[in-house]
Image (spheres, coloured by chain):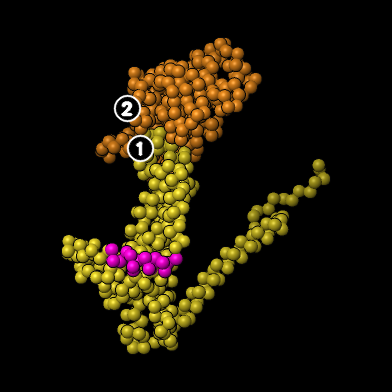
Amino acid sequence: MSSTRTTPPSPAGTGRSVRRPGDRVFAGTAKGAGILILVILAGVAAFLVVEAVPALTAPAEDIPGDRGLAGYIAPLVFGTLLAAVIALLVATPLAVAIALFIAYYAPRRMAQGLGYLVDLLAAIPSIVYGFWGIFWLAPKLVPFYEWLERRLGFIPLFAGPASTTGRTMLTAGLVLAVMILPIVSAISREVFLQVPSLHREAALALGATRWEMIRMAVLPYGRSGVIGGSMLGLGRALGETMAVAIVLSVSGGITFNLISSGNPSTIAANIALEFPESSGIDINTLIASGLALFVITLAVNMLARAIVNRRADFSGAN
Amino acid sequence: MAKRIDVSDLNIYYGNFLAVEGVNVSIEPRSITALIGPSGCGKSTFLRSINRMHEVIPGGRVEGKIVMDGQDLYGPDVDPVDVRRQIGMVFQRPNPFPTMSIYENVAAGIRLNAKKMKKSDLDDLVERSLRGANLWIEVKDRLNRPGAGLSGGQQQRLCIARAIAVEPDVLLMDEPASALDPISTLAIEDLMADLKERFTIVIVTHNMQQAARVSEQTGFFNLNGVGQPGRLIEFNPTEKIFSNPDEKATEDYISGRFG
C-alpha cells in the first residue's frame, strides 16, 4: 500500500479536515437552535427596556400612586420575593421527602402511581389553584391564623390582626408551594434515581442503614439537581400570575406580616389585574415592573448556577 | 481481629431462582482465600452473601448457615447492617464517594458508627488507614481534594483504606483489580499480602495467575449450564488446585480448556 496518499496530521483548527454532510447539517441545526434562544431572549429584553423607558424617565407624579417608579415597583418586588420564598421554603423539603419516598422507600408499584399523581398536580391550570386557594384553602386557614396571632403574635411575621378571609401572603405562598411541588419533586426524584448503585452499595457495605445510605450517597449526589429543581420552581413561583391574583388580598405596602389582610401584590399578579384598566404611561410602568421581574429571575438563576458550581469538583459528574 | 467463617449447606436465591447451590466451606482467618470460576458461576453472589450484600437486590435470600466465630450471620435477630460493619467489602470498580474528599471518604465508616472521636484521633486513624492501604505518601498533601480525582488504582486503594478504617474482621474483595492496569494491580496484590496479617480476606478473581500469586486457599465455582445453579466444585490449598486438582472440571478450567 505504498501508493496510499497520507495527509499529514494537522493540528485542530488549521487545515481542512474531512466533514460529512450529516455532521455539518446537524452541527448547523444545533448551532441555529442555540442562537435562536439567544435572539428570543434578547428580543424580549429589548422590548421590555424600550417600553419601560418612558416610565423610567417620567416625572414621579405621572406614575400611578404618585410615589415615583421605585416607590411603585418596590412593594411589588417585595411581595413577589416574599410569596416565592415562602413557597420555596415549604415546597422544597416536602418535595425532597416525596422524591426520596418514591425513589427508595415505596414499593415499586405504589411508587409509580404516586409519581404519576404528583406529576398530575403540574397539569392543573393555575386559575384552578386560584379558586381552590380562595374558596377552600383560605377559609380553612382562618382559625389557624387566629391561633398563630394569639400564640406567636410576638413574632413580627404573625403580628396580625389575622385576616378574616384568609386571603393572606401566607395563603398565597402555600398555594404557590403546592403549584411548584410537582416540578421540584419530579426533578429530585430523577436525580435520586440516577445515583449509581455503585455509590449506594459503597455506603451499604460500610454498614449504613437505608437512611444513612441516603445521607451519604444519595443526597450529596443529588444536591445540585435538587437546587436546580428548586430554582425552576422558584422561577414558576416568581412569575405565577392568576393564582396569586385571585388569592391575595392586596392593600398596603411592604410588610413582613404574613397573616393580615394588608399585603403587597406581586409583579405578575399586579400586571394582570391592572393592565385592562391602563393606558399611556401606566402601561409603561407595568412593563417596567415586568423588566424588574425579568432581572430578578435572571439573578436567581445565576445565583443557583453559582451555588451548583461552587463545589463542582465534588459533584460526582467527573 | 480476623475471624474464621464456616459456611454450611448454603443455597442462595434471587426470588425463586436458585443462583448458588449447596456451598460447604471453611475460610481460615489471617489468610487469603481466592474464588475462581467462569462468569455467572455464582462466585460473586456467594461473596456478597457473606456480608449480606446480596439482599440489597430485591428477592435476594439464602437458605443454610454462615457462621463467623460462632455467630450466625443469618440468625433471626441479626441486623444485616451490623454484619456489614464487621465484614468490609471492596468492589470491582473503585467507588469512592464522589461528593467527599479523600479524608472524608476514609472517615465515612467511622462517622457511620457514630463514634464521637477527637479530631486528632480521627486524623491519626485516617493516616493509619491510608498508610495501611499504601496510599498515604501519594495523597497526604491533598487530603481535602475529591477522591474521584485520583487515578483508578489510587481510588481502589482509597476504597481499601475506607474499608479497613473501621477495623472489620473480614475483608471481601470482588475482583478488586480487574479494572486496573498491571502496575496498579501489583500494588493491590502487595497490599493484600500485608493486610492478611490482620484480616481474613476473601477475593473473587477472574485472573487465575492472581489467585495463584496471592492466595493460600482456592475455591473453584462452576455451573452445568445457563439457568443452572452455580456450585462450589472444589476447595483446596492453592498449590494443590493449580498443580494437582481433585476434580477434572477444575483442571480443565485452570488449564484453559474452557471458561
Res B99 label: none
The amino acid at mark 1 is Thr
The residue depicted at 41 percent of the width and 28 percent of the height is B51
Q: Residues within 10 Å of mark 1 (few under 14, many from 20)?
A: some
Q: Main secondary structure of the magenta part?
A: helix
Q: Nearer the viewer, mark 1 or mark 2?
A: 2
Residue B251 visible in this rendered orientation of the protein: yes
**Quarter assignment of residue B54:** top left
Residue B26's x, y, as percent? 43, 16
Q: Colour of chain A?
A: yellow
Report the front residue among A95 and A54.
Answer: A95
In this orientation, which residue lies closer to the viewer: A2 or B32?
A: B32
Q: Residues within 10 Å of mark 2 (few under 14, many from 20)?
A: few
Label 1 in the same subunit as label 2: no
Q: What are the residue bounds of the magenta stretch? A: A125-140
**Measured from the top left, where is residue A27 in percent x and y?**
64, 60
Q: Residue at x 34, y 18 (%)?
A: B70
Q: Is residue A286 above or below residue B33?
A: below
Q: Position of residue B220 (x, y in %)?
A: 53, 19
Looking at the rendered structure, the secondary structure element under dot 2 is loop
Check disc 2 and report the residue beneath it. B77
